[in-house]
Amino acid sequence: MKNIVVLTGAGISAESGISTFRDSDGLWENYPVMEVANYDSWDKNPDLIRKFYNNLLHKLDAAQPNEGHKQLVRLEEKFNVTVVTQNIDDLHERAGSKHIIHLHGELRKARSVRDSNYVVPIQSGELKKTDVDKFGEPLRPFIVFFGEDVPNLSPAIEECERADIFIIIGTSLVVYPAAGLMNYTKSSCKKYLVDPKDVGASLRDITFIKEKASTGVKKVVDQILANN
């Protein structure tokens, strides 16, 4: 059975109403990105960070997987499929994908500041000041802040090295280390890129589908299923 790796970015979730993380104005939900996505901000103003990510949680509660998420599940009928996502939402899980690697964390989880391996689901619908770790210290969002290591990078690389087909959906290919994952694929790996913008136009040996995820992913999936 062939192996497929799908790398997804903000573009696939944007159609579900989830704001893109990195825009030209440097804002995320009207907050400066560096103000809500680095550890110094958590250290200085944890209430602001909790408020910001709790607002995202409430938006995620109201969001639904779109056709782009759903179409990927069809591939699992014939292939080993791994979704490597830069997104912190759970829309891939809710669409039915079974093997997902989150590179930048998960919005519905919280972690200990002192022990990065202490990760728990957020139980009450939002992260509260009274939610503490085993040391009695307040939990922080389970988000990879700027400057922090990406703990799931190694397993993502291993999956890319085994990939027979590599699909990129809705990512700018400028945020590293995720943007470099394609470099770990073997030379025989068939590659697709789905994005309505001119992303990766200089890349070679790749099939471009210049459409949004909800329509472009179906075209890629149809093509793969018809040819394999």
Image: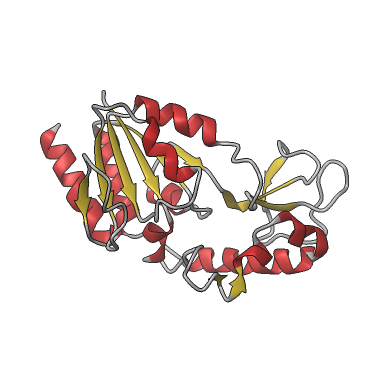
Along the line of sight, the residue nearer the viewer: 145 or 47: 145
- Left/right placement of residue 45 relative to residue 14 reads right
Residue 11 seen in render: yes
Side of 90 where 45 appears, left or right: right
Q: Residue furthest left?
A: 226
Q: Is residue 56 above or below residue 209?
A: below
Q: Nearest the camera: 92 or 149?
A: 149
Image coordinates of residue 96 in percent, x first then y, are 38, 45
Residue 82 appears anywhere in the view:
no
Quarter occupied by the C terminus = top left
Identify the residue at horizontal 48%, vertical 51% (top origin).
Answer: 175
* Residue occupying the far front of the picture: 202
Q: Which residue is pictured at 84% across the width and 41% down the height?
A: 134
Q: Would you place residue 106 above or below residue 35 in this image?
A: above
Which residue lies at the image location 68% right of the left edge and 66% below the top edge? 35
Q: Position of residue 90 (x, y in %)?
A: 49, 52
Q: Quadrant of the N terminus?
A: top left
Q: Position of residue 103 (x, y in %)?
A: 53, 43
Q: Residue furthest right?
A: 136
Q: How is the image coloured?
A: secondary structure
Left or right: 74 as drawn, with respect to 34: left
Residue at the bottom extreme of this rendering: 30
Q: Between residue 60 and residue 34, name the one nearer to us.
A: 34
Judge by depth and name the residue closer to the eye, 216 or 132: 216
Left or right for 112, reference 59: right
Q: How many marks?
A: 0
Q: Residue 73's x, y, as percent?
A: 31, 44
